[in-house]
Amino acid sequence: MKICTSIAEARAASRQIRAERKRLGLVPTMGALHAGHLSLVRAAKARCAAVVVSIFVNPTQFGPKEDFAKYPRPFESDCAVLEKEGADMIFAPTADEMYAKGEITWVTVEGPSEKLDGRSRPGHFRGVTTVVAKLFHGIEPEVAFFGQKDAAQLAVIRRMVRDLNFPVEIVSCPIVREPDGLAMSSRNAYLSPKERCSALVLNRSLQEVEKAFRGGERDARALVQSGRAVLAQEPEVRLDYFEIVDPETLDPLAAASGKSLVAVAAYVGSTRLIDNVVLESRG
Ligand code: AMP
């Protein structure tokens, strides 16, 4: 497994792979890998002949008061895990390598970037789309893999790829959960045992909405209310947003239907967690 830290080196290595007519898949991550990330690597291995995993804690997608400094960076163990998974290459640049001094160019997907997490974290999606565009230019993958866990991010990236004609297929992978239902996240490591227990309410609130939807409720306000009522049972959890939206535009819906996205974000102590579910009509 090759480890590249410079864009030039990574681009040369991935061009070499493509010259051998190998279909190249990219899995962008910020490291601190867990089973959710590994499901993306496995999906990439199943569809591509070669897999590049990027590990980069991207400073431009963090707000000034967010957890950039304390974000976990267990690089050695991430490398060992990826070696075992059979990744072909890790791209792990420094921030100086990714962002030239005085850089003033951004990629912004207007509209969806201001919805959901974009509303709560101003500038977050601009950082995400800019770094993903750079990764696409640096690695030139045919396919890139993203988790449904970050549903708003997925919508924003799909729109960027469409609007800027990136020749990259975007594949989304289902949310991987702990046995008790908590969506896996590198940030779960911040939770105390008590907070870890409270955090389960996010998934429970989504399940409540699913149950009401299956029971025939379609009014988005009523559905949101049922989810919020569950969240309110956990005083340690502070709601950021609870919304039912179109999964592509992220616009709020008045009536839910199959394919509507139910998305929640909440602070458990000082840790911000997100989760979501896509409603499914039966039959
Ligand atoms: P991150 O390292 O948090 O930026 O995540 C890298 C990629 O892994 C993103 O596409 C995430 O959506 C995806 N991911 C993170 N957690 C999960 C999970 N629990 N299930 C599936 N994909 C995930």
Image (cartoon, rainbow, N blue to C red):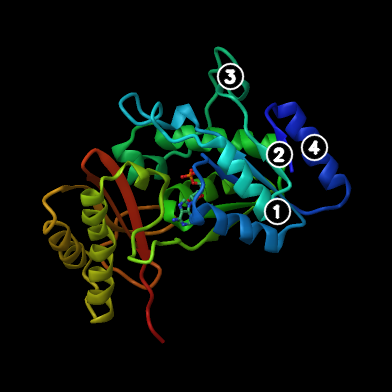
Q: Residue at label 3?
A: 96
* Pointer 4 or 2: first along the chain: 4
* Pointer 4 or 1: first along the chain: 4
Residue 26, visible in the rendered structure = no
* Pointer 1 or 2: first along the chain: 1
The residues tagged by marks 4 and 1 sit, at their Cα atoms, a distance apart of 16 Å
Q: Are marks 4 and 3 in contact (CB under 8 Å)?
A: no
Neighbourhood count class around disc 4 (C-alpha, 10 Å): few under 14, some 14–19, many 20 upward: some
**Callout 1: CB less than 8 Å from ligand 1:** no
Q: Residue at label 2?
A: 139
The amino acid marked with disc number 1 is Gly
Q: Residue visible at 33% across and 30% down?
A: 66
Q: Are marks 1 and 2 in contact (CB under 8 Å)?
A: no
The residues tagged by marks 4 and 2 sit, at their Cα atoms, a distance apart of 8 Å
Q: Secondary structure at mark 3?
A: helix
Residue 170 placement (x, y as % from top left): 60, 54
Q: Residue at label 1?
A: 86
* Pointer 2 or 3: first along the chain: 3
* Pointer 4 or 3: first along the chain: 4
The residues tagged by marks 1 and 3 sit, at their Cα atoms, a distance apart of 28 Å
Residue sitting at the far top: 102
Q: Nearer the viewer, mark 4 or mark 1?
A: 1
Quarter in which the C terminus is drawn:
bottom left
Q: Secondary structure at mark 1?
A: loop
Q: Residue visible at 81% across and 33% down?
A: 12
The amino acid marked with disc number 3 is Asp
Residue 81 placement (x, y as % from top left): 60, 49
Q: Secondary structure at mark 2?
A: helix
Whether residue 122 sits left or right of residue 41 in the image: it is left
Q: Are marks 4 and 2 in contact (CB under 8 Å)?
A: no
The residues tagged by marks 1 and 2 sit, at their Cα atoms, a distance apart of 18 Å
User: Quarter-wise, where is residue 269 in the image?
Assistant: top left
